Image: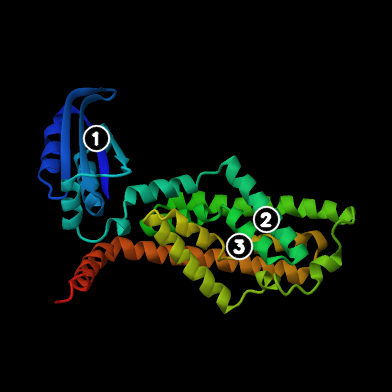
Amino acid sequence: MLVHLRVTTPQPLTDESLALLLGHDYITNVTLQRGASLDPVGDVVEADVAREEFNEVLESLHRMGVGREGGILVQTPTATPYDEAVRIEARAPGDPDDAVIWDSVLDQAAAGARPTVSYLLFLVMAVTLAAIAVILDSSILVVGAMVVGPEFSAVGAVAVGVAFGTWPLVGRALRLLVGGFIVAILVVTVLALVARVTGLITLDMVTASRPETGFIWHPDQWSFIVAFIAGAAGALAMSIEKASTMVGVFISVTTIPAAGNLALGLAFWTRHEILGSAAQLTLNLSSMIVAGFLVLSYQRLFWTRTLVLADKVFAQQDVPAPR
């Protein structure tokens, strides 16, 4: 799949931008509209670029100052049904589905670190569902609470910020992550206290043996391993924009269920439930952040070489058997 690039350049940078695009082996459909841009004043240059090589093109445009003095817009076409697109994709190393556009990753991380009303509402609803799952000992509700939880956007933002050394981003994401869980846990604790006073929930319901949901407040080595793998999968899915894979990440880690159990523990002041849930929540979030950082760091350092090597291996496998 190609990426469509639309660049607004001030006139002094237009020729240099055109030279870059026209001289590249992985770019086609280069067009120029002189004086087409009114704000900022300048020209408009458009091109189709192989996704695998897009980072290099974008970095060159940034070095020219196009992003600072003009504008850059990136779009992913639904389809590119022409022969040159097929040839460019074949020439580019790796598969476009494996390509990472780092500016897109940074934009996603910045959005994930931004506090919104919807983030807090989803988090509160997810923790509430998790608390109900604990009371009913329902593994199905646990899965539902995990899916509703929005916390991985903040977890991913922390990992991206650390990988890129963007510490203001790390700070914003951590504040959202920690603050969001504190708010959600406090809200659900208040709801649980109301349910306790009205008799809807009793201490026996919270402390009873729960074969289906007891794991959510018993951290062990498997908790770390599962959270680590899920964090790595989440970072990879975020970087290559595989939204469908993220659902699997959401239902793999017991961050939301642990928060729900923690709220119940606070409402009934059951010390072992509070400590176990807090440890589970902290362990899982930390494991996911570390795994995400490692995956993103590997991609920044070695991803291009990995794709080139994969190209060679897959090309050998694709050779038809002799008849």
Question: Mark 2 near mark 1, Cβ–Cβ under 8 Å?
Answer: no
Residue shown at the point (73%, 59%) measured from the top left? 131
Residue 178 visible in this rendered orientation of the protein: no
Tag 3: Cα neighbours inside 10 Å, few (<14), some, or many (≥20)?
many
Mark pair 3, 2: CA separation? 9 Å
Residue found at the very far bottom of the displayed protein: 221
Q: Is residue 135 left or right of residue 172?
A: right
Where disc 3 sits, the SS reads helix
Under mark 3, the amino acid is Thr
Seen in the picture, residue 248 relative to 241 is either above or below; the reply is below
Mark pair 3, 1: CA separation? 42 Å
Mark pair 2, 1: CA separation? 44 Å
State the mark number for residue 191.
Answer: none
Reading the image, the residue beneath label 2 is 127
Q: Camera-side residue: 104 or 60?
A: 104
Where disc 2 sits, the SS reads helix
Under mark 2, the amino acid is Val
Under mark 1, the amino acid is Val
Image position, residue 255 (x, y; %) = 60, 62
Tag 2: Cα neighbours inside 10 Å, few (<14), some, or many (≥20)?
many
Q: Camera-side residue: 27 or 256?
A: 27
Reading the image, the residue beneath label 3 is 255
Reading the image, the residue beneath label 1 is 7
Q: Is residue 187 left or right of residue 50?
A: right
Residue shown at the point (24%, 35%) measured from the top left? 7
Image position, residue 311 (x, y; %) = 22, 66
